[in-house]
Image (tube, coloured by chain):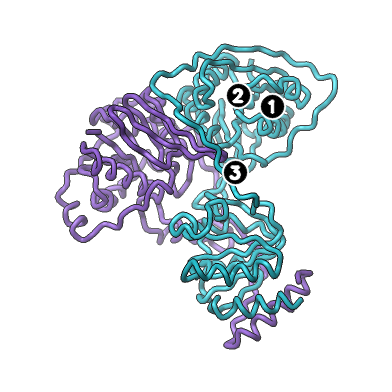
Chain colours: A cyan, B purple
Amino acid sequence: MPGIWVYSEDNTLARQLLTAGQKLKETMGQPLGVIAISGEEIHAFIAAGADKVYVLQGENSWPESYAGAVADIISKEAASVLLIGGTLRGKDVAAKVAAKRKTGLVTDALTVKYANNRIETTRLVYGGLAVRTEAVSLPALVTIPPRTYAEAEPAADRQGEISTIDAANKDTRLEIRNVCPIVREAVDISTAQRIVCVGRGLAKKEDLAAVEKLVKAIGAEIGCTRGLSEDYHWLPNERYIGISGQKVKPELYISLGVSGQVQHVVGMRDSKLIVAVDTNEKAPIFAAADYGIVGDLYEVLPLLTEAMANK
Amino acid sequence: MPKVLVCYKWVLDEQDIKIKAGDLSLDSGRAKGKISDYDKNAIEAAVLLVEKYGGSAAALTFGNTKVKQSLKDALSRGPGQAYWIGDDAIADKADAFITANILAAAIRKTDSYDLILCGEGSSDVYNQQIAPRIATLLEIPIVTFVKEIGIETEKVIATRKLGECTETIEIKGPAVISVLPEINKPRIPSLKQVMAAAKKPSAEIKVSDLGLARDDLEAKVVVLSDAGYVMNRKNILFKEASQADNVAKLVANLAQEGIS
C-alpha cells in the first residue's frame, strides 16, 4: 500500500527524518516506514513513529550496495515518498534508486511538504545565491541534510510491523580495499562561538601568526576560505567555511581579507554578528556584514587585536 | 590504455546573476556561460589519466543550443574530441532524470568507454545525481566523491573521501566515477592549447537520434520559483583614512552589541 518511507545508513539521521515523515503522514494520511541496514534500533524507530520497519541484510557491508534492495521495497510497497538521509553515501544511494525507479529526486531539501498531489520542496541553488521551490511528482525521492530536523520523540506503546529482507547486494566488480578514519583536530569550528576567518587577502602563511593573536585575544577559533585550505594548504580542510565546507553559526564572525563570494557566504551568513575587513569597498562581503572596515588587514589587524586584548 | 569520457555541464556563472530588489527574482540576463567549476576537475582528471596511461579522452555535454560555445574551452583543456547535444526546448525543462537519460543514451550511441568521469555536482544546481544515475542506466558500477584515481593492471583504483573516512576501491571493468574538487587543480589552457582546440573534432548529437521514449523526456521535478536569498544586515561601514579611528568605532559598536 502507498506510504511514506525513510532510509538512511545512519540510524540517528533516520530518526531525524521520521520527524519530517510524521508531518507528511498527517497531511497525506499514509503510513510511515523505515528501511534500515542495521537491525539495532528497530524498536526505537517504531517508538519514533514508524508503522513498519524493513531491515536489509546483505553479504556486502558497503552501504552504497543497498540501492537495488531499497528500490525493490519502494516498488513492492508502491511508496509515495522516500526521504533519504543526505550524507554523501545517502545521496549516492538516492540517485541510484531514482534512476532504477525512474523517479524525480530533490537533493538537500531545506523544507518538504505535500501539496497539490505532489511533494513541494525548497533548496539552495547557484551556490546559495537563491532558494528554489520545486515540485516532484509521486513517487517522490528527497534527500534531507543531517540535522535539518530534530529527532522524533519516542512514544510508549507504539506497535509496528518488522520484516527482515535478504538483499542480493554482492558485486564482484567492486572491492573495498581499505577504510581509514579521517583524523581530525580536536576542535570543531561548526560549534565555535567566535570565529576569525581569513581569506586570500592574507599574503603568506607566516602571517597567520598575527591572526592567531587576535584569535587568542577574543577567545575564537580560526577559519578560512576554501582557497586557503584546498589550494594553499595553509590550514586544514576542516577549517574552511563555505557551501562545500563547514557551515558555522557563531555569535561573532570576523572576516579578514575575504572578498565574500556567495559560496563562502552561505557557510557563515547565519552568524549572529558579522564583521568584515577588506581593502575593496565594493567587495560582496560587506553586503553580508553588520560592521565593516575598509582597509588593509595588515594595518587593521594589529590595532584591532590591541583594542580587543585591552578589554 | 583507457578510453575515458568526461561529461560536463555548461552553466551560468552565478557571480553574474543579480537579485532584483523588489520581488527578489533572479536576473540572469547578463550572466555569461562557463564550464561548471566541478566539471573542470573532471576534465582535468580525464586528461591526466590519458597523459599518464595512454588511451584517449573525449568530452560530452548536454544543454541548450548555447552549449556549442563551450566546445573550444572544453577541448583546450585536453580532450581529443567532443560530443554536444543542444536542445533549447528540452534543456529548458530538463531535470536530473531527463539529463541522465539523454547522457546515457548518447554514451551508448558514441562508443564504449572504460571510464566515465563526472564532477560531483554542478556549480549551478548541485544536484549530485548525474553520475550515479548514468551508471545505473548503463548498468555499470559507480564510485562517487573520489579524490584520487589510479590504474593498476586492468583495475581502476579510486579513493573516496566521505565525511568520516576515506575508502579505497578497486574496480574491474567499465565504471563511472564522480570526482571531488580536491582531486586536482585544473590547468589554465595556454594559447597553444586554445589554438589546437580549434582543430579538434566535435560532433553534434540530436536528441531525436537517441531513440528515447516520450516518457524519458518528461520532467519529474519542475521548478516553481526562484527567489534571491536575502540577508538583513546592518551594513555599517567604517572607511576613514585613519584605521585607528575605524577600529575604535568598531570596538565601541561591538561593545554595544555585548561583545568585548
Residue behind mark 2: A80
Q: Earlier in the sequence, mark 2 or mark 1?
A: 1
The C terminus of chain B appears in which quarter of the rendering?
A: bottom right
Asked if the residue under mark 1 is in contact with the one under mark 2, i.e. CB atoms within 8 Å, the reply is yes
Look at the numbered disc 3 and give the secondary structure of its residue.
Answer: strand
Q: Nearer the viewer, residue B180 or A179?
A: A179
> Splitting the image into 4 quarters, where does residue B119 fall?
top left
Chain of the residue under label 2: A
Dot label at residue A122: 3
Q: Amino acid at mark 2?
A: Ser
Dot label at residue B1: none
Q: Are marks 2 and 1 on the same chain?
A: yes
Local packing at callout 2 (Cα closer than 10 Å; few below 14, some 14-19, many 20+) is many
Residue behind mark 1: A28
Chain of the residue under label 1: A
Farthest residue toward the left?
B199
Q: Is residue A268 visible?
A: yes
Q: How many marks?
A: 3
Asked if the residue under mark 1 is in contact with the one under mark 3, i.e. CB atoms within 8 Å, the reply is no
Q: Is A311 left or right of A289, judged from the image as shown?
A: right
Q: Amino acid at mark 1?
A: Met
Q: Earlier in the sequence, mark 3 or mark 1?
A: 1
Look at the numbered disc 1 and give the secondary structure of its residue.
Answer: helix
Farthest residue toward the bottom?
B242
> Residue visible at 66% across and 69% down?
A290
